[in-house]
Image (cartoon, rainbow, N blue to C red):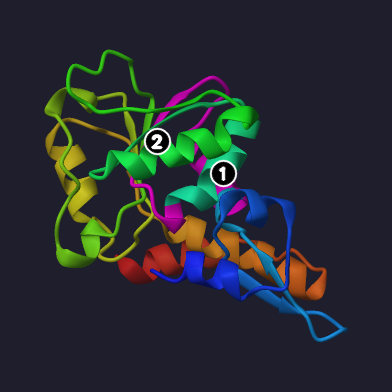
């Protein structure tokens, strides 16, 4: 989980999205022996959000976290036509991401004190769930019609999703679909074939029940 920015520096060549993101989750050995870096997280999460019907154009999306995981997903969300707000404990990192992506769409780094915008979708891009914690969010950010998505997928109901549910959110989802979708796009890069993700997602969700 912490190595996506280190993997970026490991590559000889980068795809456009990997270069802009500054984070890499997929490596491909080229015929000339060079290593190509790609980031399939963004297309993976966007496809999963579409599958779940969690996203529409012009949605206000709050991304919590400003590490490699967050960097990898922002560009496809902006290009899809969403408005992205990014918050983080270290606001300098959030501000750096805003500067990096501001030419691609509407993005703003924000603190949540007295935040007035209606948020349609919250994405937890922090590693807090690994430690059994949820990122600290004010209660008013989550409403019954707020879509809540955690990039983590273990346990199936993560601490973040559990808190959102307690605050009244009806539509919650973990990142198992993103995991499968980003892997499918990695497979496409390696082999030129895009696998059907739905049977795998269904199998994993059944296995997790």
Which contiguous range is marked in magenta?
43-69
Q: Position of residue 159 (x, y in %)?
A: 18, 53
Q: In percent of the image, x 58 and y 23: which residue is there?
A: 57
Q: Is residue 58 magenta?
A: yes
Question: Residue 196 has which mark?
Answer: none
Q: Nearer the viewer, residue 136 or 157?
A: 136
Mark 2 or 1 closer to N-term? 1
Q: Position of residue 125 (x, y in %)?
A: 36, 50
Q: In the drawing, does residue 207 fall left or right of residue 25?
A: left
Q: In percent of the image, x 58 and y 61: which residue is there?
A: 182
Against 22, residue 7 (above or below) is below
Residue for badge 2: 95
Whether residue 42 is visible: yes
Tell how many labels: 2
Residue for badge 1: 46
Secondary structure under tag 2 reads helix
């Amino acid at each position: 989980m912490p190595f996506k920015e280190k993997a970026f520096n490991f590559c000889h060549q980068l795809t456009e999205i990997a270069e802009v993101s500054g984070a890499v989750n997929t490596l491909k050995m080229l015929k000339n022996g060079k290593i190509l870096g790609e980031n399939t997280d963004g297309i993976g999460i966007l496809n999963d959000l579409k599958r779940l019907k969690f996203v529409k154009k012009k949605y206000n999306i709050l991304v919590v976290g400003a590490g490699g995981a967050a960097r990898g997903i922002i560009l496809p969300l902006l290009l899809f036509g969403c408005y992205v707000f990014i918050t983080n404990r270290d606001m300098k990192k959030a501000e750096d991401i805003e500067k990096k992506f501001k030419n691609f769409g509407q993005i703003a780094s924000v603190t949540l004190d007295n935040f007035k915008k209606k948020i349609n979708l919250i994405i937890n891009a922090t590693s807090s769930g690994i430690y059994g914690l949820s990122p600290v969010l004010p209660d008013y950010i989550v409403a019954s019609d707020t879509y809540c998505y955690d990039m983590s997928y273990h346990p199936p109901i993560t601490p973040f999703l559990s808190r959102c549910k307690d605050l009244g959110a009806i539509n919650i989802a973990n990142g198992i679909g993103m995991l499968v979708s980003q892997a499918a796009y990695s497979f496409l890069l390696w082999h030129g074939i895009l696998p059907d993700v739905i049977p795998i997602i269904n199998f994993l969700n059944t296995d997790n029940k």
